[in-house]
Image (spheres, coloured by chain):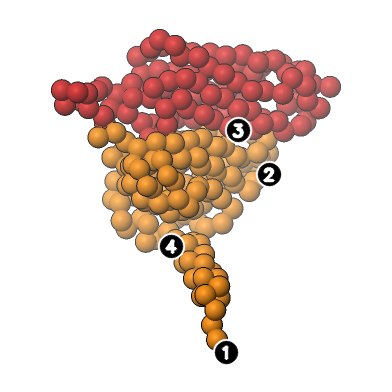
Chain colours: A orange, B red
Amino acid sequence: MTVTRRQILAFGAATAAVTLVGIPVSKVLAAAPEMDAKIKEFTGGATPGEGKLTLTAPEIAENGNTVPISVSVDSPMTAEDHVVAVMVLAEGNPSPGVATFHFTPLSGKAEASTRIRLAKTQNVVAVARMSDGSVYMAASEVKVTIGGCGG
Amino acid sequence: MANVKPRVKVPKTASKGEIITLKTLISHEMESGQRKDKEGKPIPRQILHTFTCAFNGQDVFSCDMEPSISANPYLEFDAKVEESGTFVFTWLDDDGSTYTAESKVAVS
């Protein structure tokens, strides 16, 4: 069988897609002690689980000055069971904190979008805290072409 | 800070119990404190550090913002409306200023 150029490209794209999905959360944490401290403060020491929380960020951001991100948490958002807050962190920025969204049952849905600055290619991390105290975490790598923290 | 203009996008009408999407945008430099001027001196930080949204006096959503938020901060979030009323959006500036916007929604 002859392998065509098209097949090689398709294979390459598929492999890239597989490697991009899912960054182990533990690996992300070890890399940035300052960020780790912020997460501990936010979670109160609870071990973050995975799932429920979705962080949407572009794979490649041409301009680090304005990178659209959104977070969404799977929750019924009732008075008994809702998302209290979602914190977004950027491990490679001069200061890792980006934003903390505070939700209430009146929010209806635990979803929020904003635009952030990223100094360089890095992992963006989101941590969600539920009303029952459980914690979820998600991470996504964003490749930045032009950094956005001035110089 | 001059020329700070909040803009909000809220549906005018909604049905009872509907979850509506609210969008806000405010023109603001969001000076991060990381940049330097022509003489190499750091430009002091001046950002909007807090955003809140309340509906008929009850908190709906709020956000603590840090220097990593882009200039002209944009926020999109949701709210569940059970009755007609007014959304009040508030931004707090590092220099002590407060910017507000209001939007009414009629629930049928």
Amino acid at the residue labelled 3: Phe
Residue B36 appears left or right of A83: left
Amino acid at the residue labelled 4: Pro
Q: Nearer the viewer, mark 1 or mark 2?
A: 1
Letter of the chain that mark 4 sits on in the rendering: A
Same subunit: marks 4 and 1: yes
Residue B14 appears left or right of A54: right
Real-space Cα separation, disc 1 to disc 2, in angstroms: 53 Å
Letter of the chain that mark 2 sits on in the rendering: A
Q: Which residue is mark 2?
A: A76
* Furthest residue in direction bottom, as rendered: A1
Q: Which residue is mark 3?
A: B77
Q: Nearer the viewer, mark 4 or mark 1?
A: 1
Real-space Cα separation, disc 3 to disc 1, in angstroms: 53 Å
| x and y percentages locating residue B76 in the rendered image | 58, 32
Letter of the chain that mark 1 sits on in the rendering: A
Q: Which residue is mark 1?
A: A1
Residue A32 in sight here:
yes
**Quadrant of the drawing holding the N terminus of chain B:** top left
Where on the picture, by quarter, is residue A84? top right
Q: Earlier in the sequence, mark 4 or mark 2?
A: 4
Q: In the rendered structure, are the residues bearing label 4 and label 2 in contact, judged by CB atoms less than 8 Å apart?
A: no
Position of residue B106 relative to residue A48, above or below, is: above
Question: Could you say whether the residue bearing mark 2 is in a helix, strand or loop?
Answer: loop
Between residue A102 and residue B107, name the one nearer to us: B107
Amino acid at the residue labelled 1: Met
| x and y percentages locating residue A28 in the rendered image | 37, 57
Residue A146 appears left or right of B55: left
Q: Which residue is mark 4?
A: A24
